[in-house]
Image (spheres, rainbow, N blue to C red):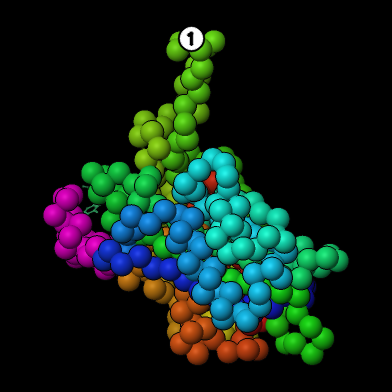
Amino acid sequence: MFDLKIIGTGSFIPETLVTNEMMATIVDTNDEWITSRTGISNRRLSSGEPTWYMGAEAARKALAASGIDALAIDMIVVTTITPDYYTPSTACIIQDELGAKNAFCFDMNAACTGFVYALDMAGRYLSTPGINNILIVASENISKIVDYSDRSTCVLFGDGASAAIVSRAQPGDSSALLSTVLGAEGDGGGFLVSRALDLKHPFVADDKIWPDRFNHTAGHFIGMAGQDVYKFAVRSMSDSIMKAAEKANIGMDELHYIVPHQANSRIVEAAARRMKVDPAILIQRMQDFGNTSSASIPICLDEMIREGKLKRGDKVAISGFGGGLTYGAAIFVY
Ligand code: UT7
């Protein structure tokens, strides 16, 4: 258990709204297929904003909600698989945007599980002296790596960013990070691939360059073995949440909400059946935002907090799964 309290959240949802009907004008698909197979009706795509900008806007809102000064932030971690630069990191750019001069900064890639990994990391850093406030930003312009002629992937994803400021809980606070379960299955890495820049320099012949490890042919565009990822997702989501509950020593019936990665409503519902939980505690927002990778869980949390749905003292399980393959669950008291 870690003394961790979420003291402020914020999101940036880009304005460009793309409906299923609009997707059907660019690929051979239809609203009925997308809705029934995924639960997604709309997604928002960047209107031109880079990943750093969306993240900084989300962070500004989280800062305002927290009431702390940017100078009080000790660490900034940005989760993204779609940064604008190899260097500087998105976190360094956001530090500059906020004037958070006292923070050390880095980006972290755990694909769609990024926010869960970052929350675990925050809990551990906060348990050491000298770190009091951490800014976690999840910012994703997945549209940069989506092939809009591939109907099997392009209908799924959306862009967006969300941020949370987490601090050390004080004595008397009910807030805490009760448990985390993180993992990865690298042997499934080939099920979800997007390639970075190729090796190429003046002292290497083209025929010496190794072939792609995953036989990935779509370059930086996402290639996904949908059904393999689907099965992994149902298994890892349910197993990790149940393990996290066991670790936290609480029953599944004590959870007020489960906020899963928003990839596909069928995944969430199949995992819920495995966990035998009341479907009413599952948060599903993929219908409006699509799959925004690591931003999907904090976007839901921020919305719940702003709507007053999530209350202090509520027990929440979050669960991520995706590229890597990575997975993770965390249970916290808000
Ligand atoms: O955040 C990262 C984690 N990612 C995920 O969690 C994604 C996990 N996978 C999934 O959610 C599902 O596998 C998909 C939604 C991607 C696909 O659903 P599915 O039920 O597994 O469909 P499928 O891949 O088995 O395809 C069934 C059919 C195929 O046609 P045939 O071969 O049966 O004639 C596809 O070509 O559906 C076809 N299809 C489409 N049809 C209309 C695939 N995409 C589309 C489309 N519109 N957009």
Q: Residue at x 55, y 60 (%)?
A: 97
Q: Residue at x 41, y 74 (%)?
A: 284
Nearest the eye: 22 or 244: 22
Q: Position of residue 332 (x, y in %)?
A: 66, 76
Q: Position of residue 145 (x, y in %)?
A: 38, 45
Q: Residue at x 35, y 34 (%)?
A: 218
> Is 331 on the left-hand or right-hand side of 34?
right
Magenta region, residue range: 18-42
Nearest the eye: 258 or 92: 92
Q: Position of residue 269 (x, y in %)?
A: 42, 71
**Residue highlighted by disc 1:** 205
Asked if residue 81 can be seen in this view, the reply is: yes
Nearest the eye: 113 or 276: 113
> Is 184 on the left-hand or right-hand side of 200?
right
180 vs 230: above or below: below
Q: Residue at x 82, y 86 (%)?
A: 171
Rendered-image quadrant of the C terminus: bottom right
